[in-house]
Image (spheres, rainbow, N blue to C red):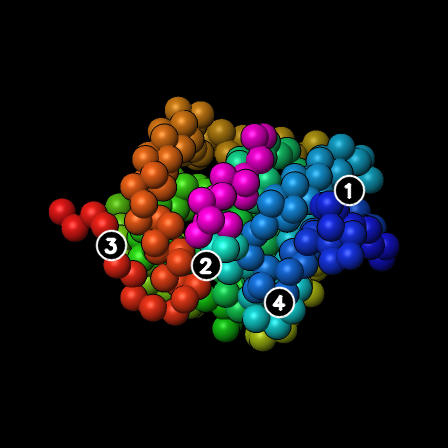
Amino acid sequence: MTTTQAGTDTAAPPVQFAADGAIARLILNRPAKRNAVSPDMAVGLEAALDRLESSPEFRIGVISGAGDAAFCAGADLGYVARGEGERLSTQRGGFAGFVRYPRRKPLIAAVHGYALAGGFEIALACDLIVAESTAQFGLPEVSRGLIANGGGLLRLASALPRAQALDIILTGRRLDAAEAARLGLVTRVVGEGEAVDEALRLAATIASHPVAAVTESLYLVNAASSAPSAELWALCAEIARRVRESGDAIEGARAFLDRREASWQDKR
């Protein structure tokens, strides 16, 4: 297996790209920040997806997080607190350079620890999710004065009955791996420390099949499902902009970083 770097910070690459035969491994590499998404990570993830999609030797990708604590804890709220949240997206890929990227090849998320907020949205943007039994999922954006505009709202509304989707979205509560699997959001649940290996085994099985059969099957399944339309993405972005500009979004991020209760401006 050979590893290269994607992104602009060569001292501590926020995304690593590893070639494992026909499998491309994308590794979120900010473990000290629980792999929270930075501008460099967004650029690096989009570049990694470009390489996966354009290289014929790769048939499938597996995305995972470095370190012991998290797959991805979402957006780096330091940027949000400074009013720089838009830097965490790219024009083509959306949040993290990832959630709106126009893929044709399958991608598996290998989740351990926390997959919260944008981290959950990255996992939901994948085609399959392998989760360790200790994984935690959730969209806590409402508790920070934000909305989950990286596809979390749209994809949960498509994947779950309305009442179940709203229970997760409006409360901001966490789901463990067992509940996520019961709701049909997770493909397989494995023991602690086993997600990457299981995801690679699953990827190897998929990669062993003819390329066209796999990619066209994936395309038709996505076409038949209620995938977010361009109009829904645009509506989500406009609402997210209005919410961010209310001021409570910055206060929510600052309160989280300061470990204090937020003082909301909008008390209607």
Nearer the observer: mark 4 or 3; the answer is: 3
Q: Amino acid at mark 2?
A: Leu
Report the magenta residues as a range.
79-92
Disc on res. 32 = 4
SS for callout 2: strand
Q: Earlier in the sequence, mark 1 or mark 3?
A: 1
Is the Cβ of the residue at disc 4 closer than 8 Å to that at disc 3?
no
Kindly identify which residue carries mark 3. 264
Mark 4 and mark 2: Cα distance apart in space: 16 Å
Q: Residue at x 64, y 60 (%)?
A: 30
As drawn, is 53 to the left or to the right of 249?
right
Kindly identify which residue carries mark 2. 116
Q: Position of residue 203 (x, y in %)?
A: 69, 52
Nearer the observer: mark 4 or 2; the answer is: 4
Mark 4 and mark 3: Cα distance apart in space: 29 Å
SS for callout 1: loop
